[in-house]
Image: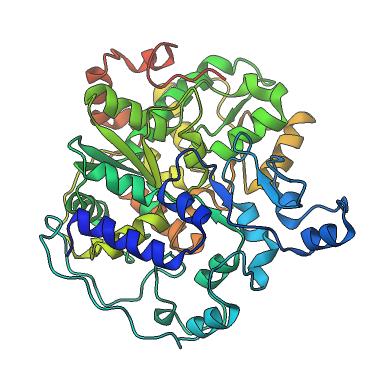
Amino acid sequence: MVTLEKLYNSLHEKTVKDVLDPRQLNCLLEPGNLPPVWRKGPCDCEEADNARQSGEKTGKQAPCEAVCPFDAISRDDDNNGVIDGQHCTGCGLCLEACACRTRPSAAASPRSSQELDEESAGKAGPEPAGRSAGKPVAGSAGRSAGKPVAGSAGESAAAQDAEPDTDLLRELRSNLAARKDLFPVLELLQQPAPVYALVAPAFIGQFDGDTDEDSAGRLRAAFKSLGFAGMVEVALFADILTLKEALEFDEAIKNEEDYLLTSCCCPVWLAMIRKKYAHLISHIPPSVSPMIAAGRTIKQLLPEAKTVFVGPCLAKKAEAREPDLAGAIDHVLTFKETAELFREAEITPADFTPDARENTSAGGRIYAVSGGVSQAVRDTLSRLRPGRKIPLKAKQADGVAGCKALLEEVQQGLQGANFIEGMGCNGGCAGGPAVLTARDISRPLITAYSKDAPYETPADNPFVLELLENLGIATVENLRDPDNLFHRKF
């Protein structure tokens, strides 16, 4: 058990020791306004090397360039990849495509290929001596002896399965890295202002295999032990946005040719429409995401509060910085970053006594899987407008390629659907780039958690009505007013 100060100092010491390049070190300690993905050092993929040898650009795109759906990666005069922070949405495809992932790169890691291979095979030296005792983070549980989360930074490769290649090894060899916000969050937690963890609906099954009905309560207790003032399930705000989307559908769909493009919760889907299919923007409902809704609500009710979103998505780091949304969320941590934070703080969420708060419906909880938004809005619309002449007829796509194909279909005159849902990750948020549990395992857990909700739809959730009243929103119908917290103009 460690104090926040010791936790910060320990992580700082490890980072300084492991990362020798000053630029990389600065990006980790002070991420500032970095895009969701940044380049560690000079590119040494085949395309870059060939271009340097020939003295000119070959015209052939590097793998990271070719896979980017938003044209956010180009090459400079030295044939190094350049990531445009204005266009990078954090879809994460370039992290998988980077050619350096399959071979050692001196630029990508200060350690040699041989050292990495030996560490991966469990041949590294002994673990460093344990930290000295100090005043513990209040209520923290002892670290379990179980296997750490594979691939998260700071993990000893010897603790992995002694395979010749691992997530950690590939991450160290890659020349691209996901932005990390651990240090700013730890600094925030040491300030007097209350800090709230806003946890995405995809959290079930992500931490220590905790999957039963009390897992949310245990996770809340774990966050409090770390110094957070509380934890809020963002599913509560998915409930509110579901009501709003149902009302927007009811207002917009008057004949068989009308349609809406959702989901407000996926920044990759929205970015694809806005940047590649701008002529379809008028079909997007004017709603913020549940993350932004949660942050704005907390800051209206508690002006001094700070907010940290926790989820499976790199793209949320970019969304939180968008000019019309900035200020609602102070920092974004991925599930991988959060697992690292818990591990370094010697906190095991599954060991805690639940701090339960049952205030979300099945509709809000199911947002984490592809098709969940459509299901939630359809069920809520049936509750608000039973017997509606034109029912909600949904069609979904997930994954960047699937979303693009669906938008092409819409452009050509899609038939038989009036509620078009896109999720940028395969399987929805459950398949995000920073999940700890594979989507084929987490999806049924999320579905079960949704079915266990005390309320079937947001329209049945008394906490939603109470919260809206506290925000000065007199009726559910007022959610469509353009001057409330949940409105966004596209």
Locate residue 323, reporting x and y percent.
50, 24
In this picture, residue 60 sits left or right of residue 4: right
**What residue is shown at x 26% (from left), y 39% (from top)?**
196
The front one of 472 and 225 is 225
In this picture, residue 164 sits left or right of residue 189: right
The front one of 403 and 45 is 45
**What residue is shown at x 18% (from left), y 69% (from top)?**
142
**What residue is shown at x 77% (from left), y 46% (from top)?**
77
Q: How is the image coloured?
A: rainbow
Q: Considering only vertical position in the picture, is 123 above or below 293?
A: below
- Which corner quadrant of the image does residue 144 belong to? bottom left
Locate residue 440, reporting x and y percent.
50, 62
Q: Considering only vertical position in the picture, is 112 above or below 486?
A: below
Q: Is residue 305 visible?
A: yes
Locate residue 295, reporting x and y percent.
34, 31
**What residue is shown at x 28% (from left), y 45% (from top)?**
187
In this picture, residue 391 sits left or right of residue 214: right
The front one of 296 and 120 is 120
Q: Considering only vertical position in the picture, is 75 above or below 101?
A: above
Q: Residue furthest bottom?
A: 123
